Amino acid sequence: MPSNELASPRSVKLQLPSTVEEKVEEEPTADINVEIKKHITDNKPKRKTNFRDSINRPKIQADTPHCLTSKKLFGRLDIIDKFVGKCKINKLGPNRYTGRLYTICRALKIHPKELVTNFETTEQLFTDFESLWDKINPGKTTEEYRKAVRKFLTYNNITIMPHSKAIPATTDSKGDYSRVHLTNTEFTQGLDFIEKKAGFEYKALYAIMHEMFPRPETLYGYTPNIDIQYAEVDGKSYPYGETEIFEKKQKKYYDKIILDPRVLKITSQLKKDVPICNKPSKVIEATLSAVLRDFYKDIGKITEGVMYKKGIDGWLYTNRPIYTLRHSAAMLWMSRTNFNATLVSKLGWEDPKTLSTYYAKTTVKNIMQSGTCYYCRPPQTKTNMAVFCSPTHALAYYFKVFNFA
Ligand SMILES: [Zn+2]
């Protein structure tokens, strides 16, 4: 990695897939109780005996306050009812906060009023919650929980100390993965590797992900229906693929283009209007993740046994192996369009800023490359990341180098 990659922009989208949030609300309350005991006995001697008594009981325990036995009861508490009212006055959806407050209270077995006695106490409680959370969801952010607590404090007129380290106002730094990508050569290696290890369907998923970069959950259910179009370059006509993909998260259709003739060929071998792989999403995800991790190891992106910290490229390759391809695709498309973020963002991002900040940051090298085109204005020394003045020139170039002409 070049040294001009800097840490600490933010990307909410990257780290907070909806599944994470759901997990927190519904998942292992029993485990939380076990974990909380271990942790909290150190800090709260008075509660010690209660926790000891209840350690092996599932979910609702003798010492769980009655108001936490159901979300409904929790919602009926005066303090929560008032909070909801204030949220509504301020035109905020209260559910975003109350669900998380419920989780926190239930994990800590406290009445919500304990969260708003004074700021120091809240800091301590939230720290307790985070250490439980971290054992159950290592590496996952508590950002939304922090926001809920801060809002709860504010609406209960508790002064939040500025620069609090325990409950900071800042959005999490999501690390900078904006230069994560596969080179042209590496992508080609991936086609062979994945077909050999996991079969044609997984090769197709990999190729489509890298060319059209839908969200992973969209990819699994995607039913290919690709129109072949033709672009004329220097008197020759070249086929490319055109399709659209509906992204549920944004409730929006995105146009997608397939330029790489190898990917277009793969899609032509798929059945129309049925999912690429006829297996449950969970199976597809697990298999594709596993084979991709093996592939990343094979090409030296990650090393077996190394624990990568968040913010380091290796973390993304290891922990978001499929999502990594969306990053790579962003770089690929930028290189096909003379680094035109406005144009590329039309293919799958809300706005050019998200794309160029989190997915494909333009480097000095890119700026110096602008105007270069491997088709019409090739550099003397070629690298394994070709750049083009326009998508059509990329298309013509691919036909030449991949022997499709
Ligand atoms: Zn050109």
Image (cartoon, rainbow, N blue to C red):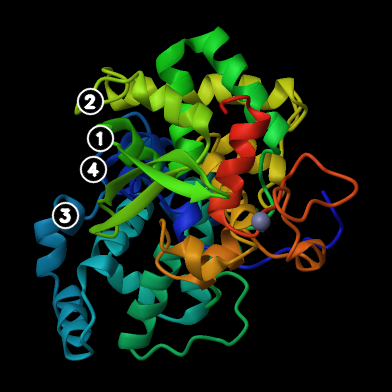
Residue 316 is drawn in which quadrant? Answer: top right
The CA span between labels 1 and 2 is: 6 Å
Q: Secondary structure at mark 2?
A: loop
Residue in view at x 23 percent, y 90 percent? 90
Work out which residue is located at the far front of the displayed protein and give it. 235
Return the mark for residue 66. Answer: 3
Work out which residue is located at the far right of the displayed protein and give it. 380
Q: Nearer the viewer, mark 2 or mark 3?
A: 2
Residue in view at x 21 percent, y 24 percent? 274
Residue 185: percent from left, percent from top:
72, 31
Residue nearest the observer in this picture, 368 or 251: 368
The quarter of the rendered structure image containing the C terminus is top right
Q: Secondary structure at mark 1?
A: loop
Q: Is residue 74 above or below residue 255?
A: below
Task: Of the two numbered discs 1 and 4 on the same chain, state the one appearing first in sequence.
Answer: 4
The CA span between labels 2 and 3 is: 55 Å
Residue 13: percent from left, percent from top:
45, 58
For the residue with label 4, is its CB less than 8 Å from the closest atom of ligand 1?
no
Disc 1 target residue? 225
The CA span between labels 3 and 1 is: 54 Å
Disc 4 target residue? 62
Q: Is there CB contact under 8 Å for labels 1 and 2?
A: yes
Task: Of the two numbered discs 2 and 3 on the same chain, state the one appearing first in sequence.
Answer: 3
In the rendered view, does 11 fall on the left or right side of 117?
right
The CA span between labels 4 and 3 is: 9 Å
Return the mark for residue 272. Answer: 2
Q: Give, as a three-letter code, the residue at label 4.
A: Ala
Residue 292: percent from left, percent from top:
57, 25
Q: Give, as a three-letter code, the residue at label 3.
A: His
Query: Which quadrant does ligand 1 occupy?
Result: bottom right
